[in-house]
Structures are given as structure tokens and as C-alpha cells.
Image (tube, grey):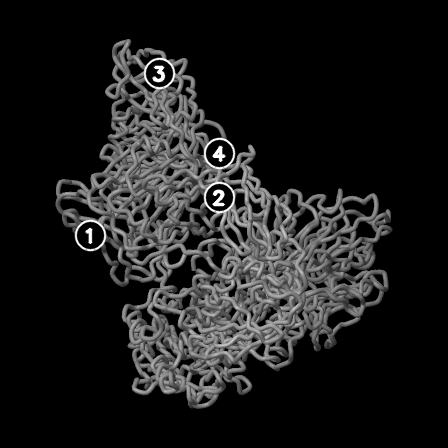
Amino acid sequence: MNARRLAPGLSTRTRRRGALIAALTLPLSLMSAPAIAQGPTPPPATASETTAGTTEPTLKAAWDQAAKTGKPVEVPTHSTETMKVWANPDGKNMRAELHTRPVQLKNAASGTWEPIDTRIVTRDGKLQATRVKTPLTFGGRGAKQLVSAPGKHGEIGLGVTRALPEPKVSGNAVTYPDAVAPGADLVVLAQADGFISQVVFRQRPAGPVTVRLPLTLPEGTTFGKTSQGLPQLKDAKGKAKAAPIVLTATDAKVEAAPDQGRTHSVKAQVETTGKTSELVFTPDEKFLADPAVTYPVTVAASSTWFGGGAPDDAWISKNDPYNNNSAAGYLRAGTTSTSADIARVYLKFNTSDPVLKGATVNDADLRIWNYKSGGPNGQLCGETMGAGIQAARVTSAWNLNGTVDSLDWYNQPSSTAPETVNRAGYNYDADPATWCAKDEELFYEVTAMTRAWIQQGEANHGIVLKAASETAAINWRQYYSSQFGGGSPYPGYRHPPALIITYTPAPTHPEGHTLLSDSPIDMDTLTDAEANAMVTQVSTVSPEVPATTTEESSAVRAEAESPFNVLPEGSLPLDEETWEDMDPTPGQPPTVTQQIPGKDATEVNPGTLIAVQFDEPVTDTQISVKDSSGTAVAGTMSADPQATLATFTPAQRLAENMAYTVEVTGATDVAGSTMAPYSWTFTTGGADTTAPSVAGTDPADQATNVPLNTEIKVTFNEAVSEVQITVKDASDTPVQGTVAGGPSRWTFKPASPLAASKAHRVDVSGAKDASGNVMAPYTWSFTTGADTPPPVPGLVAAYGMNEGSGTSVADSSGQNNPGTGSSTAWANGKYGKALSFDGSSSMVTVAHAASLRLTTGMTLSAWVNPTTVTGAAWRSVVTKELSSNGASYALYAANGGTVPSGWVQTDPDTSATADGLSPLPVNSWSHLALTYDGAALRLFVNGQQINQTSLSGSLYDDGNPLRIGGNVAWNEYFSGLIDEVRIYNRAQTAAEIQTDMTTPIGQAAPPDTQAPTAPGSLAATGGSGGAQLTWTASTDNVGVTGYRIHRFTTPGFTPSAANQVGSVTASTFTDGGLAAGTYYYQVLATDAAGNLSPSSNEVSAAVTAPPATPGLVAAYGMNEGSGSIVGDSSGQHNTGAASDTTWANGKHGKALSFNGASSWVTVPHAQSLRLANTLTLSAWVRPAAVDAWHTVLMKENASGPAYGLYASYGGVPLGWLSNATTFKSVVGDDPLPINEWSHLAVTYNGTIITLYLNGTQIDQTPMTGNLADDGGVLRLGGNNIWLDEFYSGLIDEVRIYNRVQTAAEIQADMNAPIGAAATSTATQQQRLNAATDPAPAIDRLTVDGGRTVDGATLASTLTPRLTTWLSAGREGDAKVEVEIAGKPTKSAKAGEARTDRRLIWSGEVTAKPGDTRVSLQVPEGKLRDGEKARWRARIVTDQQTEAGGWTAWSQLAVTTAASQEPAKTSAAIASESAQAMLAPSDFPYDPITFAQCWQNMNRASRVGGYTKNSFNWCGSWYLHQTRERESKIFGFVEVEQNTGVVGYRFSYAIRTAVGNKVADKKGDSDTVKAQKRANAEVGARNIEVWVIIDQVKPFDNLPDSAAMHANGKLTVDFQIKGDPGGSCKPLAGHDNSAVTRTLQNWNNYSHHFRFTSDKLASTGANRVSTCTLIPRLYYEGSLEGEEDGYIYNKRDEVGVIKKSFRCDTSELVLMYYGGCIFPEITPVLGLSTADRLLYKGRMIDNKAKLHAVHIKEAMTSGKRIPGSPDRIAQNPLSPTPLTRAWPGKNAGEVEYENRQVVNRTCTERFGPGWYEANKEHCDEYPFASTLEGAANDDFDFSVKLIPECANCAAGSTQSIFWMRYRVLPGDTFYVKIYDGQPPAQ
């Protein structure tokens, strides 16, 4: 560096040209300096020799390359986000370029460094910064979010109070004009690690302006104030989290001329309302109105409190003391003529990176870009300007984050004497005649301070720049800061401040470490700082890792962030369970929870009955009632079905004003515990004079949509008789029926269903109580719903998609097959609503049911509106899945070849398809139907059969779900709208399908017998080889579905099937391919019911013979005008199928419009299209864009085109041909005009390729040989080789010849329209499927075990099995050829297009007759992890002499990150599991697999691992054993460079178990009870642990890796500790000894360990213990310097890889006696408000529905109600868990006290006779069995009357949930209410 430095203060005028050239080719740190700071002379350069002991391969290679080229070579492995490093040519020294903020980011996919790019671009429809550390998104037009950025603690950003205007983007700035006020803009600047917001006043405002910007704050923060009253972001403890907000208004001259500019502070405040905070400020009105202020005026925040991190450069000034200008795009240092105007710059560079540790600093410069200067006497630039600016080392801390050290004028750090001064300055506003009138670098030599930081251990607090003399004199400089977002015309131009260090790295010697990470480490790009963060703790003795205590475990559970959702079905009895004989409160007798009348009640109605409610089912209950004289009251006893309510009904009315005593005895629970006698008293009142009244009705008053079969119920407030109920309809006609019931609830049962959609009135009268009081008449009304049509024969599922909200999709068939949507949205449909599917993850799931298991009868139908049908993706409409990658039946909108298709399987290996003729139109509705009748599979489109396949046998179904819009068998997703899905178990006729088309689901179809009107005004125009017909549209009472075209050679003919030549839906038809002659035409219209209209008028057309066109093999005039068939007029029948295109007016007649994203026309391979050494290609094109590669036509090969024509490649047209060895192209000179017609043509005569534009030759290039053609398809408008080359615009008149046309012939074709193409039904049938399925014998391509992501199949192994599905009915052997290729790379050099051939592997397999699929496994070594490739197949039969056409390419991506576990590992986990031996077989363990573990690697590798549910856990980490060279620096070991690395993944999974049922019976002895428990708990507290090590990989580019891989040994075992001690231990009888293997032999090896928790050594009534498993890995290296020892945790992380679990043997969990769980995951009790629930594939009544409704009402009531796991806006306590209390039946116990409060509240709210009146229970929430119940004054509670069955079901659900998931007293849990059917889990 110093060798090129000028003497201090000298100019660079003599070498400016050289400096510019260097800047264009060298990085920043290598540019020469235009002006140099004064400072000491550096030491001379040392000899150019390699540093002793340094042998790092990457560094040595860089030095070697630098020596060869004579130029420094970058060393990316030593770089960081803020530092770049180069190896110097001397082979010894390095150069580091340090910045204050990130200048580059590492690409996670490639591992390469990419420069920061703050430019704002449009990405996925959003304005975003191109490449910055903190991703930024900016608001678009109409948005109210100005800018947002994801932060560590949630999203942060700024908003606006009104919609934003259209943004204007320039570089890194986005401007919103007039967003604040007229003439006042909002401007946001993207930064490397944050953003800056500004308000820019372009003109003087008319009055005061107040700006309000809503803030999105990081989680857990709020705004406070500093001691100066400035707003400042603070955390919950009041600690500053960012710098104070300091706003300054600066006018236009401040930056240009500091001594002339005007500034003014702007007071800012943050106003907070609720959770909404707004930054509010009003610039000073007088300042804005001051004539001396120059506009525009900018108000900017001075700090990036709102960004991803504060910068490390800022400047302060004395006249604005609290502003550190850290958000400014410039830095200022120096003085002006005003004494108060003193500015200083502070900068800080991170010199602590390990690559600099121990280095010898040879030289260091601060390089800072100077663009403005000021000196005495108005001097603007020069080699000497005033006293100059000096640099000094800062010696105390400062920062910009708002803490006490935050920088401002009054809070500056100390510094040393100046080290250097530079008196030069530049100013691009100076006189252009001066050499310094520019912006350029200034150097400050800072070698001494840099050595102090790196070599002498001084703390690095940065650099300060200030005037050499700070007296009042003009002497200032302005530099670009790290916030500068200007242009960069060449590397290093206008760069932010940089510190350039030349150094000699420290010597190294061998050592070893182990690195622990959550993903594989790229050792080539791993920095030492990153490695240092991954280094584990290693000990030669077993590490002492503490056990987790039970208290710690409980604390973790209380703070759990990810609760485990138990859906409503998870708290229902399992198939093998009986709960009726379970004692819900074992060991405790029953308790009376409520009594009627109430205890000590007075004025009780003498007609009352006596009832008691128990807390559990009981038997043998006796109730005796005695009056005050002791006389017993006669009466009868009864009990409810749940056996929890006992009722005594007196035989006679009780005496008035009499005291009575009730005694309850004998109540015994299922375990034989008998309640102690319970008694209470009450007193009756006097004579009853109160008339009975109606307490409730069903239906409710004014209810609507009441079912027609409803029974009318009336509930009274007391027992009554002689009730009269009359029901009348709207015409006052009585409804016939009967009345029954009593004593308090009476029912009117209509004799027949009520009238539909009618208002009904109910009159109730005559009700008399026991005292003879008669009610006053009571009237209410309701309205019935629509009549439900009778069941449709054979209909098993029908989805009208009319819900319009939520995720539930109702089944209208009556078969109860509802669905649940996932990632779907609602939209307007064909009829009513429809569901919208996103094409990547959306689907509706319907559980398997017997009704969906179809056999030899089937119809599937749906209306579909696809957004795309292009590409290799299959677009699933309906799929009934099979477990082994298959489908029992399926309907597709596109089959991977763009046409609709049907698929069925009659066994796991045999499939059949029926494919469409042409692609469905996009963005419009089409009706699809597929039928099977045991003999044939038939496909219908818009009610017309278009194909059929012979087939017999019953459809195969193994009980998997039905899905709509997607499937998981092959991960195929539909994109667009789906409506009116029907499934029948019989084959419908065409007429029935047509009826369904026009009948919305749920409505009866009226018979349609009315035919359409005749088509009118038929006209025909004859021409060359064909005729064009037009007519006016017919009308119909339902709707016209199409037209039939009939043709004859004589007039007056009768239309018939024999003379029908076509059918269309439009009112035009082209009849092509005709010989010369006169033809006669008639047209008939048809509707969905099959009614035919009268014939149109008859017309004739004179057709002339088409001109001779020798050599024409394909000709597309695009004149069809509708549909997706593109006819070929050449006579060669090369018909095309259009996808995602639309019709438009063309150059001649019609044309096709292509969207530039997915449109193309596909023509199957044919021998006529295989051109050899002569050809002509031509087309008229009208492009909408010519900015990239845009395909007009291409005959595809594996690695490019056989021949192709482009409207543009980078702007100009191009023709491209390939032979067996090379690619050649001809290229235009200028871009084609946009939105204008141009004619392109390419010819090849075997020696020369020629390109023509508008008939004129514009380029030629030589080529010889035949064209290479491997049987790929021909495409127009795009290609499947490079999926980013779609054409945008119109294409017309495409011709392909197998000969060379002359220029004159090309010009003649330009002006001659292509004749009409044959479009008759017979011609279309000739090409059925061929247009979209190049290999008719191949149905589909699949990858075994693969999953589809973004259109590519992901294989989880490097040797995937590729399966080709073959069509049924093939005879003889057939050879299936498969090939895999990489995506060809393409380049364009010197006007010529090039590509490479990237065949990866090919193979073949023979399919025997009857085989319906064959598979090939890719050999090892062919595919690489992370590779993206493509594959295809073709079939060759014995009858073929030439290979058939290839299928379309299928995209393939290989990743082993979520690999399926090895087979032996799966077997190991499945075997020996205690889970299989204890609880019922359908217990919801949901066992974990390693595949699931690895799919959740982000959680499995973190502290605590991945807890799948209460019973399954796994942890997984990547470890890298390294052998390294290191340097000793001040006694510390610092890693420098690896010589050997072996990486591997260590994973272990734990499964717990639960015991079996204990059911104590009445009369059981203690011995019998003990034996039952002993039998039930066998193995319940055993733990299964599996370990696997896989992905063992030596890093082959390092010399020691192979020896470490082969010889290094790893030993694995587990230590188990318990709380209390001794409660946890290895399981006796199982070999739990350590396992030792070499790293090489560990690969994919698994081992099984077993442990147990000893009940007897556990504590408490529940026998609880907490066990901690500590895996111990001991590495024993084989090479010198490897570090042997136990590998356990990362530094400063105690619990990385240990795991704890909790075991209990609680008498509260007798259903599953004994068991273990992972307590840190909090279970969530799920309840639903749906009427019915899907449970184990069947629908059941939801008995707890009203209980769920009550809880939802309570949670959303605005009260302080705990329990919800989700945040609820109306609930201030959400989310807050509940805590289970100990069962308590005595005063002072929580549950007892809660129930007492509930009973009092219910009596107060609903009256003393609430149960007697309604026979309903008083439901409470929070539950009485929780600490948060009604007696807890810290919380609110809610009560509601619900039916007995609902309350009992709620209690049963809660009991099952607690037992199943081992929720013990003191444990927390949540309650979640699902609206409707819960989602599938």
C-alpha cells in the first residue's frame, strides 16, 4: 500500500487516468489514493516469503494465484459481512478491508458472498430492498404500512394514517409524493441493516403541518423518555433499547454549504393509545416560513431505532448537541466561521475477528470519500485547506443505541493525541477548471492505533475526526457515511468509510475441536467467528451435567411457547376403552354438588320435587323426606340416565308453611365408596297464587330456517298439567299434531312435516299448576327453512362450497362426508360461492368413509376455473388416495400434459386413465366428469364425452382420505376455483351429467324439455381449402351448451350424426382441409338436457383448391378463434394444443395471445417434424416485450432446441439450430418494435443458416451436418427446457418447411394467409391425447417417497427410485428408457447462443405384458445433495422401429436434509416399544420417527429439542470433528485453519408409555386392588431411546479427513439422573452399555437404549419423579493434535443436548395407571361448537357442543377469563393457562369452595327453582376443578344453564383429557374452542 502512496499533501493530477482504470478493475482496498493524510512513515516491506508454519490450503492457494498474476486474490473464507480479505502477491501478507456496516451477505444456498444491494425493486408484487441484512418491505399504493422489517422480537416498522399514494422509486429511496400534505413527501431509504425515514417539504407550507406515523414496535417494548425529555424505546424494565428520537429540520443548503444552511430542532413525541403508538411531530412554523430557509426542507430521524441495528459511524455538532446524525447519508467534521458550529466524526470498525488475532500490522489507512469541503476565503477544494482534519484513537466507550454511553455533543468519549492530519479536500461544486472539482477519497494513516487494537490488546473504541484547530474559521469536510445510497459506476466508487489493513497473519500449529450446529457446516466458507460460536465443551472426564428438578420442569411447562393441541376427538373414548366403570375420583366417596330445593330455602312451592346432583355416577341412592313432626312423606324415586341425579317426587302436594328435612343415604360410586348421609332442610310457603309461566321455547321466538321435521317444545317454570299447544301457519290454518310431556316440559309433535319457508305461530294456554293457577296465554312465532330435496340416488358426496367463510366444507348428499379446507379461500363460484386453491398447498380433506369406497360404479364431477394448466404438474380436482402413492379414483384438470384426465386403480399396481382432447381454457368455467360402469372409464367435458378406456374390475381402496384441490399421494395441487363437486357410486348417463351441470347442489332440477332457438343468420365464406361459418347465437330457457355443424355436398340435406363435422361453443367455425367444390351447411344448437334446436338456414360455400406448398410440414393460421385446439393446415396433422392462451385479432384473421409467463402451444413429436439438413421456419410476431429470451417456436431436445426461433434474446431476434456436436445461431441487429407486427424467418441449407426480418436477409452463419432431434415436442410461445423464456404478445401464421425457401417465397408467404385447418371431429379424434401426451403409453412419472415443492419433486435420497406408470391394454414387451439431465446452462457470446449438454444418467427397464408401472433406481454417485435436475421417459415396443416421443421433463430436486430414516432405524423404533404393550392400540401416541425429527430440524437442534406431543421427543445436531492448526496468543488458543474434518449428524428419539386400566369394583379387597394396579402398571414407566448417527462425511479436500473418518472412534452412551435421586435408572435386563464404532462404521447405524423410573423411589401422593437423560459422546482421535474427550454442550449452554421427562403413578389416572410424559409441552383441551364431529372416520353427535358455546361466550365477553391459548382481543387475560386443583369435597378446599360460589350464583341468577323448571345443569367456567375457578377473586367466571347431557359430556371430556395427557394437580393446561369442524391434525 505504501509503495504507491504520494508524499503528504501532494495531488494526484498526474495519474488520474491510471487511477480510474484501476478503479474499474480492482476492489476498493486496492485503489490508489488521490490525497494522503500526514503521518509517520510505515516500516519497510518484509521479504516475500511464505509465513513459517502456515499451510492452510485455501490461503496457500490464494497466495500462489496472487504470485502468478501479480495481483491480490480475495480469500472469501476469511471474510465477514463487514470485512473483505485478500492475499497479497508476496506470499506472506494479507489485506483486510473493514467497514462500519455490512457490505456483503453470505448466500445461504451457494455459500458465496454477495454484495449488499440497497436498491428497491418489485419482488412478488411488493417493493423490497434487493439484498440487505434485515429484509425490508415498502408500502404500495393504497397501503397504510410505510415500511416493515422482521426483527428478533417481531415485526417493526412505520405506518401512515391515510392510504399511501403511488410510490416513486429511485435507487435505495422510495418517495410517496404529497403523502404528508400538499408539497410534503414521505421518503424511506433502505440501508444495509435498517432504514431511514424522512419528511421532505418541497415547498413552503401554507400553515402548520403535523405528521403522525403509527409505529410497529418490537415485542416487549414501549416508549419512555430520556432525562432530556426525548422519546426513547425501552424494554419492560425501562432499559433503553434504542437511541432517543431526535428530529432536525434541515434546509437545502445545510449539506451543500454548512456555513449558509439553516437547521432547526423538531420536537417529537410518541403518543400511545392502548397498544397503538404514533410518532407525532410538528416542524416549527416560523422556521418553515423563514425566507432565509431554502427549500426543500428535510426532517429525518437521527438514529435507526427502527432498523435492524445502529450504524457505527455518526457525527455530532455543537449547535445541535443532542443529535448524532447517525441516520444521515453523510459525515461532517470541522468548523465554520460560526463559533458554535463545530462538527466531529466518530467511526468504529470491528478488528476482533479471529483472522486478525495475532497478526502483525504492517500498515493501516482510513479511507473516506470526500465530496464537499470548505476553507478560508471561500476556498472549496485544494491540496491545502485551512488547518485540515485530523484522526485520533478513541479511548472510551460510546454507542448509538440510546444507553448512557450514547453519543452526543455533551456525551463524547475521550481520545488520544491525533495520529494523522490531512489538509486536502475535494468539492464537486468547485470551479470545474480546478483539478479538485470532484469527489474523491481522502486517506488518514492510522497504523499506530490499529496496532494498538490488534497487537497491543487496547480496546477498540474507534476513531474520531475533527478539525486540527477548532477555532471559528472555515475548515470543514463532508464524507459519505455508511448510510449513503448513491450510485456505484465502478467498484469502490463513492464507498462508505473503510479501514484498510495490511498484515502478516499469525503462525499456526495443529489442534482439534468439535463444532456443534443445527445444519451441515460448509467448511470452505465457515469463518472463525462462526466456528468459535459452535465450539463445544470437551472434557477428558465424564461431564457433570445437572439433572432437571421437578420444580424446574414445572416452570418450563408454565412458560411453554408451543402448546400441544388436543382436538375434540382426542378427549373422546377410544374404541377399546370403557369409561363407565371408571371412578373419576378414586379413593373418595361421592359428594352432593347441588340440591333442590336449596339448603335452608324458604317460601318453597308446596308442589316442588326434591333432587340431588352428585359429582360422579352413583347407585343405591335413597332419599327420605320428613315434615317437622317427623312424619315421612310418601313418594317415588328416579334417576337420570347418567346416574348423577336422583329425584324424589312426593305422592301428594306438600303442606303449606311447613319445615321439611331431606336425608340422602346409600349413594355408592363404581369403586364401592359410599357417601356419608347428607341432609338439609327447607320450608314451604303459603298458598300458591302465582300462575305458571313459559320459561323457554324451542324453536326460539323469531327463529328462522327451522327444519321441517321440528317438534315444538315449551318449558314452564314449574310442573303443570292440562297444557294446550296450537300451531298455525301463515294463512292461520292449524297444523295437525299431538301434545305430550310433563311435568314442566311439553311437546307438540306435528302429524306431518311443516310447510317449507313459512311463518308459523304457536299459542300456548291452559297450563295449570298444582295449586290450580292457570297461565296467561302465550304466543311466539318462527319461520321454517327451505324444503330439502329428496336424496339423489347414488350420490355419496356433494360439495356446493357455499359456506363462504371458515374451513368447513359441508356435504349435501346426506352421507355425512364433510371436509376441512386448508390454505383455501372463498370466492364467487359457478353457482353461489366456490373455493379458491393456490396451486401449492391448498386442499380440502374428507375422511374416509364406507360410502366413499366405490367399486364398479362411479361418477366424479365438478365445475373448475383454472388459472393455469401448463407445465409438468398434475392439477388435482378430486383424489381418493391410496397409501402407496396411488389413487383409487381421481379427476384432474390437467394431467402433466395440460389436458384434463381421469385416473382409477383396480389394484395397487394397475391404473387406467381417460385423457382429454385439449387443455381447458384458463380463467373460465368448464365442467368435468368421469364415469366408470365396470366396463369402461369415460371422460366428459362440458357434458360431452370426449374419451373412454375399456376397463373391468372393482376399484381398489385401502381406506385413505378423499381430497379436493390437491393430494398428498403425489403432492399435486390445483390452481384456481372449484365448485359443485359431486361423487356418485354409480355411472351417470350423459343426460344426467348435463342436468347436474345446470343444477346447483341442494336444489332439485326441474325437467328441461324446451329446446334452444335455431341459430340465426348462418353465413359461409369459401376460400382456399376450407370455409368459414358465422351465425347469431341461439337462446334457451336454461342455457345453450354448444352448436353442432353439419355439412353435405348437395342442398336440402337433413342433419344427422353421419354428416356432423364438428361441434363448438362459440358462434364461428372453420371447416378446413377440403377439396375444391361446393359444400352446404346447417347448424343446430343444443342445451345441457340434450334438447336440439331447429336447424338454421342452409348456406353454401365454394371452396377452391389450396395452392401447392411443397415441403410444408406444419402451418398454423390460428384462425380457430375459440377453444384450445390449434389446427395444422399443412395436411400433416400436426395439431397443437394451446395452454393458458387467449384469442385475438391477428395479422391475417385470428392470432394467439401469449401471457409471457405460462402460455404455450404443444405439438407432439412426429416424423414429419424431424428435419434433417434443410428447413424454413417463419412466423408473424407482435411482441409485447423484447427484454429477455422470448421463444416463438422450438423443437425441444434434452439440452436445447433441435431448431428454434426467438423474438428476442436480450433484445434482438435469433434463430438457433443444433447438430450432433454444436449449436449455431443467427442474430438480428436491432430489437423488434413493441406492439407492432414483424415477420421472422430462418432457413438452413446444410451449410448456411440465414435469418430474415420482414423478408430481408439480416444475418448468416455457417453450419454443416444434420440437426440433432431426440424426439422432443414442438412448442410455440415457450419451451420446457428453460421455463423463463415464455413469449409475451401475439403470434400468427407459423410455418415449418422441410426445405429451403427463397427470399421471394418467404415474401410471398408473408402476404398470403394460411388456409383453414381441418377441425372436424374425425380429425380431432385422430390426434386425441397426442397433442399433450408425447408418449401415449405413459400415464405419469413419480419419484418414490418424493414430495412436490414449487413444481419440483423433492427426493430425500441420492439414489431415488423413478417410477414410470404405463397405460393399461399394452401388448408385448416394452422397453422403457429413462434419462436424467441437469438444466442446460445458456450463454450468448459474440452474438451467438450457446448451451451445454448435461446428461447425468440414463437407464432402461423392460415392462412385461400386464405391467402397469416399472421402476429404476438411480445408481450411487450420479446425483449430488442439493442438486436440481430433470428427468423424462419414453417407451419402445416390439412393434416400433423407432423410439416413441419423450414425455415432458419432470423437475427433480435432491435434498437429504429431511431424509427418510434407514429401514433398520424405522424397524428399531417400531420394535421393542412399551407403547405397543400397554394402553389400547389406538391410544394417541402418534409415535415419532427420525424423518419427522429431521423435518423439524429447526426445533430439534435448539435447546430443549423437538417435543412432538406429550409422549414423543427428539433432538438432532450436526457435529464436525476437526483437526486444526492454531496460534497461541497471550496464552489463548485461537482456531486458524483446518487440516481435517469429518461431519456427522447425531440424533436421538425418546418415547414414553402409559399404563393400562385399573377399574376397582364394589367389594374389592385391598389385595385385589393392589394386584390390579400391579398388573396395569407393568412397563408404564419405561422409556425407549433410539440413537442414530448418519450423514457421516469426511471433507475430502482436507488431507487428514480420510484418516479421521476411517480410524477416529466415537463412543455413545447415556447417563440418567433423577429428582429425587435414585428414582431413574437403566432398565434391568436390557444392554445399555456404551457403543463404540469408528466414524465410518457409525454411518446410518442405530442403537436402542431403555431406562425406567422407579415408582417406589418417587415422591408425593402421585409418585412423581423427573428424569434427565444426558447423552455422552466420547471422541478418540487417531492423529496427533486431535482432542480426545467427552463432547457435550456449546459454550455457555448447559442444556443443549440433555432431555428430561416426568413419570407418575397417580391414583387420579386409573385409566392409564402409571406413565411418563414430556411436561414442558402444555396440552390444550379442544372443544367444538359443531353439531357433529368427525371421529375415526365417522360422524358422531357433539354432546358437549353447548358447553363449548358457553366457554366461547365467556372467553369473548370482555371479562378476565383465563384458559385460552390464543390472544383474544376482548379478553385481557388471554393467553393465560388454567391450573388443575386437587379434588376437594370439604370446606376450605379449592374445588369445594368454587362449587359453593357457583351454586349461590346460579340460584341468584336463575331463581331457586331453576333445575326444577328447566331440568338443566348450571355450567361454570373456569372449571370448578381449577385454581382459577369461581372462588378465586383474581379472575372472573361465567355460569350458564345447559342440558344435563351437555354438562355430563363436558365433565367426561375433561376427565378423559386429564387422564390421557396426565394433567395432575398443579399442572397447567389450556382450553381452545373450535368453530365448527376442527382442522385435521
The residue under label 2 is which amino acid type? Pro
Of pointers 3 and 1, the one earlier in the residue sequence: 3
Q: Quadrant of residue 479?
A: bottom right
Residue 1634's spot in the image, x, y percent? 33, 85
- Badge 3 local density, few (<14 within 10 Å), some, or many (20+)? some
Q: Secondary structure at mark 4?
A: loop
Q: CA distance from mark 4 to mark 3?
A: 45 Å
Q: CA distance from mark 1 to mark 2?
A: 64 Å
Q: CA distance from mark 3 to mark 2?
A: 45 Å
778 on left or right of 1652: right
| Residue occupied by mark 3 | 1094
1465 on left or right of 1877: left
Quadrant where the C terminus is found in the figure: bottom left
The residue under label 1 is which amino acid type? Glu
Of pointers 3 and 2, the one earlier in the residue sequence: 2
Residue 681 vertical placement versus 1441 (above, below): below
Residue 1071's spot in the image, x, y percent? 31, 20
Asked if marks 1 and 2 touch (Cβ < 8 Å), the reply is no
Asked if marks 4 and 1 touch (Cβ < 8 Å), the reply is no
- Badge 4 local density, few (<14 within 10 Å), some, or many (20+)? some
Q: Count every numbered label the image shows and give the total.
A: 4
Residue 811's spot in the image, x, y percent? 41, 46
Tell me what residue is drawn at x 14 percent, y 50 percent.
1408
**Mark 4 against mark 3, which lies toward the viewer?**
3
The foreground one among 762 and 978 is 762
Of pointers 2 and 4, the one earlier in the residue sequence: 2
Of pointers 1 and 2, the one earlier in the residue sequence: 2
Tell me what residue is drawn at x 24 percent, y 44 percent.
856
**Mark 3 against mark 1, which lies toward the viewer?**
3
Q: Secondary structure at mark 1?
A: strand
Q: Quadrant of residue 1838?
A: bottom right
